[in-house]
Image (tube, helix red, strand yellow):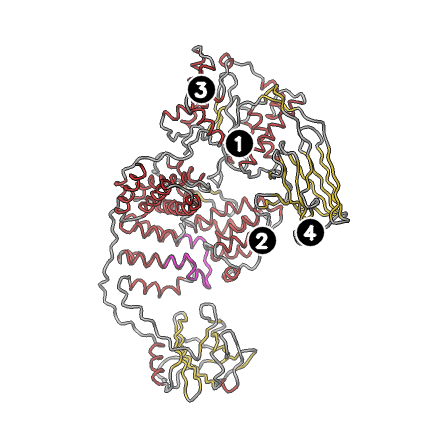
Amino acid sequence: MSQSIFHQTVLCQTQTVAEHRSKVSSLSVSANKGKKNLFLAPTNFRGNRLCVRKRKLAMGRHHHRHVDAVPRAVLTTNPASELSGKFNLDGNIELQVAVSSSEPGAARQVDIKVSYNSDSLFLHWGVVRDQPGKWVLPSHHPDGTKNYKNRALRTPFVKSDSGSFLKIEIDDPAAQAIEFLILDEAKNKWFKNKGENFHIKLPVKSKLSQEVSVPEDLVQIQAYLRWERKGKQMYTPEQEKEEYEAARNELFEEVARGTSVQDLRAKLTKKTKAAEVKEPSVSETKTIPDELVQIQAFIRWEKAGKPNYSQEQQLMEFEEARKELLAELEKGASLDEIRKKITKGEIQTKVAKQLKTKKYFRAERIQRKKRDLVQLINRNVAENIVEQVIDAPKALTVIEHYANAREEYESGPVLNKTIYKLGDNDLLVLVTKDAGKIKVHLATDSKKPFTLHWALSRTSEEWLVPPATALPPGSVTMNEAAETPFKAGSSSHPSYEVQSLDIEVDDDTFKGIPFVILSDGEWIKNNGSNFYIEFGGKKQIQKDFGDGKGTAKFLLNKIAEMESEAQKSFMHRFNIASDLIDEAKNAGQQGLAGILVWMRFMATRQLIWNKNYNVKPREISKAQDRLTDLLQDVYASYPQYREIVRMILSTVGRGGEGDVGQRIRDEILVIQRNNDCKGGMMEEWHQKLHNNTSPDDVVICQALIDYINSDFDIGVYWKTLNANGITKERLLSYDRAIHSEPNFRRDQKEGLLRDLGNYMRTLKAVHSGADLESAISNCMGYKSEGQGFMVGVQINPVPGLPNGFPELLEFVAEHVEEKNVEPLLEGLLEARQELQPSLSKSQSRLKDLIFLDVALDSTVRTAVERSYEELNNAGPEKIMYFISLVLENLALSSDDNEDLIYCLKGLVSTTLL
């Protein structure tokens, strides 16, 4: 993907790192494809022999790191030293600090004891290097330490009989002192040193003397071993640099104590000294400095037009650069002459700049292809099919007929008239006033016995036991309510097959009736809430929505009629939508717009996702798969509807064959078993996942990951949920409600982070088709192994992708979170441009490409929004350039885009003037 010939390759002297490299080869490819390996071996020449070593030593995160060529120095150290101090805090509270370093090269240990006991006592700290007052946060710190706003570390004290204590190891060789405050977090009480920070000096290593060198490949091995010892943590770029320098200094100190480089190599690589010592070949008697090979490689890359090289091409280019310089040397040219020849102009500055920014001759942005924008014009105008069917008068239901007849029968004015849908039946509530009394008439066409559980109220929230004068025959009173059975037939209209009930209220202080229905042991409510009828309300008349012109009226009526069935589960909703796709397509743009609005209401939680119905995850994913397959066919066969089909797909998860959905059900059981978390919140979530998985589960999984990463801060869990529209009430509203909060042990942290991270991909594969990471994985292919009863899943790469497209997606994934969004936007739009020909071809995996295009489009929008602050201070040229990128993105998403393309051409021409 990179435009750099150094993107995935480096130079080396020997293959001694191979043994350690093999341990972590599996780490080079992770679920987080956007990250880079931490340590790259430097480019080193010993004599004239050069071999190429691929980067493999991954330490937590992937990141390119340049290592300067062969520092020639050893470290002379001071004897083991010890510093200490005693302080009085708040009168009788004593603080003792002892600092020691047992031997040269060992980490400095800080022991802190305080005669104060609290469950919430923290050390608020950092180390100081060469800038007084500026705190640096070490990568190595005790368990339980939290990063406080990237300004300090907070480490909990351990309680003891005499107070609290803490041990901290500081292996940052540049650290000169530790500074800290002590905080009782529960009381928000700070302990300071006379109003200032406590400042404790650390034993300082002396300066380097220029005597011998430590080979860089050994530094790399030592850095890897340090990383293993520390539990293979995820490091920031600053922490990576700190770790690498610490490894280098440890080796310098070994050499300073008399260890030879050969012995050091044998120790680190677990090989005998004899196996490592080799006589140099004739070609190794000449030396080419690393920086000259770097410059020569850069020159070759620039001359070739800064192309996107494959890994094999990168290796070949490095070898060619080495050969060219070696040939010059063998012709009799000196190193000084070669240096003067190839470092003319700004070339050395360019190379140095890339080394400084750790880009390793890697282009900071992709090279966009020149295209004729006119070739992007689409003239696919969506059609609106005029409905030829004449609306037949809607047939009235039994209750609607009865309501009209009963309304004519009543002598007094109608105060309120409401008809509720109860599944396949209706319930009429008619409120009238006659001779100063409020009369409430209820009737239903249900054949099941109905009992009214009701009360009177003066406010909508009140339940008051009705007075005896208001109770119909057969009523029974209870705490704050009464129950009255419906009777068969109607006294006013015996010909109607209904059940009815009459209530009379002569106390005008009552304002309404709250009620629910009891039928065959089940409670019937109004969409989960109590029914409530106001006495003084106005007669509710069905709104006139007009004649439906400009809409696919028949389709919309069907959607409305089927909603009560659709809200049972996602399986029902997706299957109903699939059944309506043909009718929507035949109705043209208006029909597909109806499906879009319906699915959009679903995606934004405006419709009920699940109601009294259990369904397996594989059944949901199968229904999704069916719907997305049908939409894929419409996209391929009807170019004029592609824009609206893309929007529909963006509201629906990708779905998948049964195994993809089944893995949601199986994998949560494996997570619970492997991490000993079979009760509490995880069991409640497991029950929800088994019976009704939904897009909410993606958010819940992310909230759990954030909670664990924050060192089990429950506030972070709720922050993630609430930010994505999930409240405590929503968790309780699930058919399988989640009542509990997560409560994990510290020893579960590593396993849960690993397993939940993998589970997130499973959830996104079904529910988040337009998620960028998920869309890239589906197109590039991935494999999830089975385990015991858990099914395995293998998604093959989409065939026929353009050359270099995987590298382009890798570039996008690497830059997706960077603050400077311009290179990302260029990469996103280049990927969309490269994808366009494939989107025009019909193939079985077309929907995966559509989901990828939707994800790229969405990422463009979020990246542009992220750039607003940067653009506030930008010049007109940059603002116009960003506008052109936004316009290009819009044109790529639009069916009829001719006007947009010509606007884009004009804007591009203006920016080039």
Q: Residue extending furthest top?
A: 332
Residue 607 within the magenta-colored segment of the rendering: yes
Which residue sits furthest left? 388
Which label sits in the foreground, 1 or 4? 4
Quadrant in the picture for residue 215: top right
Disc on res. 714 = 2
The type of residue carrying mark 3 is: Arg
Magenta highlight range: 598-622
Q: Residues within 10 Å of mark 3 (few under 14, many from 20)?
A: many
* Three-letter amino acid code of the residue under disc 4: Asp
Of residue 640 and residue 330, the one placed in the foreground of this image is 330
List x then y, in percent, for residue 593.
31, 57
Q: On the image, numbered disc 4 is attached to which residue?
A: 119
Mark on residue 445?
Answer: none
The mark found on residue 322 in the picture is: 3
Q: Position of residue 308 (x, y in %)?
A: 38, 31
**Nearer the N terminus, badge 2 or badge 4?**
4
Tell me if I can see residue 659 in this picture. no
Residue identified by numbered label 1: 39
Q: Residue at x 58, y 19 (%)?
A: 276
The Cα–Cα distance between marks 3 and 1, rounded to whole angstroms, is 23 Å
Asked whether residue 651 appears in the rendered view, the answer is yes
Q: Earlier in the sequence, mark 3 or mark 1?
A: 1
